[in-house]
Image (cartoon, grey):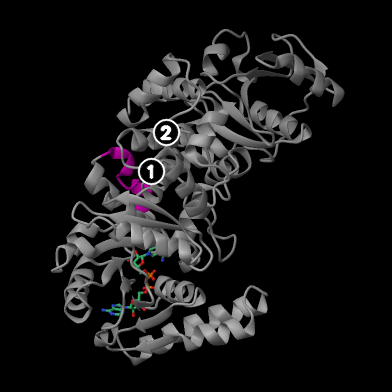
Amino acid sequence: MARTFQTVGVVGLGTMGAGIAEVFARAGLRVVGVEVDAQALDRGRGNLHRSTERAVSRGRLSQDERDGLLARTTFTGELSDLGDADLVIEAIPEVMDYKRALFADLDRVCRPDAVLATNTSSLPVTAIAATTSRPGQVVGMHFFNPAPVMGLVEVVRTVVTEDGAADDVAALARRVGKTPVIVGDRAGFVVNRLLFGYLNHAVTLLERGVAAKEDIDTAMKAGAGLPMGPFTLLDLIGLDVSHEVCEVLFQESRDRVHAPAPLLRELVTAGLLGRKSGRGFHDYDGAAARAAAEPAATRRAAGAAAGAGGRLGVASVHVFGEGADDLSSRLSAAGFEPGEADEADVVIALSGTPVVEHAARLPRPERLTGLHLVGERVAEVVSTVLTAPEAARAVADLVKVLGRTPVACADRAGFVVGALLYPYLNDAVRMYDSGYASVEDIDTAMRLGCGYPAGPFETLEAVGLRTVRDGLRALYAEYREPFFAPTPLLDRLVTAGVTSVGER
Ligand SMILES: NC(=O)c1ccc[n+]([C@@H]2O[C@H](COP(=O)([O-])OP(=O)(O)OC[C@H]3O[C@@H](n4cnc5c(N)ncnc54)[C@H](O)[C@@H]3O)[C@@H](O)[C@H]2O)c1
């Protein structure tokens, strides 16, 4: 019979613990919050008081509900006060030695039938469970920040977790208004595994000088429809935390895409940790040091970006490639004359393949710029090694006339959006194919854990399996990175003419 949890202990009342305590107390459970000393206890109590005060002032909680919530919550410095708890959730710092010592203590003071859970983001739950005499009753319960707001909880079942324990914890997560997904004990679980592969890859694109960080952020936000660009997100998470998560992923996967990008390490070593230190990839203190986090090669590539000055007086434009007629007529309507390839002021290749292949066939290749439309709002403006910076700037200006935001980038497979999106989708297919999680759980996890408008399988279907497979083949052919090779499942589905993955 499924157990009912009435009293929940939360150990560590920092950023996550205070939020987790609030989630349970709001849902009517009794909560016992534990901290290391009186000062930390005051801080933890303060966190909960402030957060619930804010919720009242924003109309998300009534004063009566807040009073009830606080009355159900007790604060203590003694672990032995957890003797009555049905479930204890640990949210102390991400250091294995601390967690193991704590779980050995919890095992002594808690009832033998109590479930012990860790909120760890990246440490193996199995190794934490092994310090107790009840490894079958130990699970991961991974909340997202801020816990009262974020809907997802990853419930982690290890190979020794007893039948029912993870299901009972998942049922509790549902009871307190969260959506649980039950997964196995692999580094990064679903969300961090998929998210950090993508974020680290964005840093690699920046290092390679494919595009400037602002352009990459714009491409993924306005072009791919994500809530924020990868560098804004990295700064928000913290570059030290991000570096550590990538390192943990790499230790397990031994895949180069998880090895923290050298630029990430350099920024962390320099103390540029993101928002919390005032500067990371972006500068939150002022404009002075804005360019510092960017390699010189990228700054040069960005010289061709929109609005960099020195506009070309463009009167005539020649467009070729898929969709050329439509673009030509829109440019004509905006006052630009159509011109022949050998005499137009600029030549635009609407192309998803290497633009330089077209340039090599033109009499004046310096006038050729590639253009790749992404969604409704963005156009990637592609400079080859032959493109004159003035030509790329002129095309960026034309793009603005057409109501799109230009993203300046180098002539590399996938440009920016494809290079970041396709390997992420491929990784999701790989995760599903390995039996780690279902299509539905992976989609749910990415939607709720990252606030993405769609899960990776929904995006894959929207973009088209064949387009993604072909994009991955191009990326693999260019970089020879095994991670970019289409997973055999994706390849087979495309060959079979199937348009969706899995059981949906
Ligand atoms: N911050 C996030 O975005 C986030 C998201 C998901 C998961 N996590 C995970 O949650 C855990 C906590 O992270 P956080 O950001 O809340 O850390 P934090 O530093 O804000 O809070 C940790 C708290 O634990 C207390 N503490 C330390 N040792 C203790 C002990 N032995 N007994 C009782 N309290 C103790 C500290 O005083 C501190 O208040 C980590 O495992 C982290 O990986 C964090």
Q: Residue at image x 32%, y 72%?
A: 87
On the question of residue 292 being in view, the answer is no
Quarter holding residue 42: bottom left
Picture quarter containing residue 112? bottom left
Q: Is residue 264 magenta?
A: yes
Kindly give the residue lying farthest to the bottom in the view shown: 38
Q: Which residues are magenta?
A: 255-265
Q: Is residue 104 above or below residue 494?
A: below
Is residue 427 highlighted in magenta?
no
- Which percent across, then down, holds residue 167? 34, 57
Residue 302 location, x and y as percent? 57, 39
Left or right: 372 as drawn, with respect to 418:
right
Q: CA distance from mark 1 to mark 2?
A: 9 Å
Measuring from the top left, give residue 227's x and y in whole percent: 58, 50
Q: Are marks 1 and 2 in contact (CB under 8 Å)?
A: yes
Q: Is residue 499 above or below residue 60?
A: above
Residue topped by disc 1: 197
Q: What's the amino acid at mark 2?
A: Pro
Q: Residues within 10 Å of mark 2 (few under 14, many from 20)?
A: many
| View extreme (front): residue | 1
Q: Ligand 1, what quadrant?
A: bottom left
- In the rendered image, the quadrant that contains the N terminus is bottom left
Q: Residue at x 55, y 18 (%)?
A: 355
Inspect this view and state whether residue 440 appears.
Answer: yes
Amino acid type indicated by mark 1: Gly
Disc 1 element: helix
Residue at 23% x, 57% y is 124
Circle 2 residue? 423
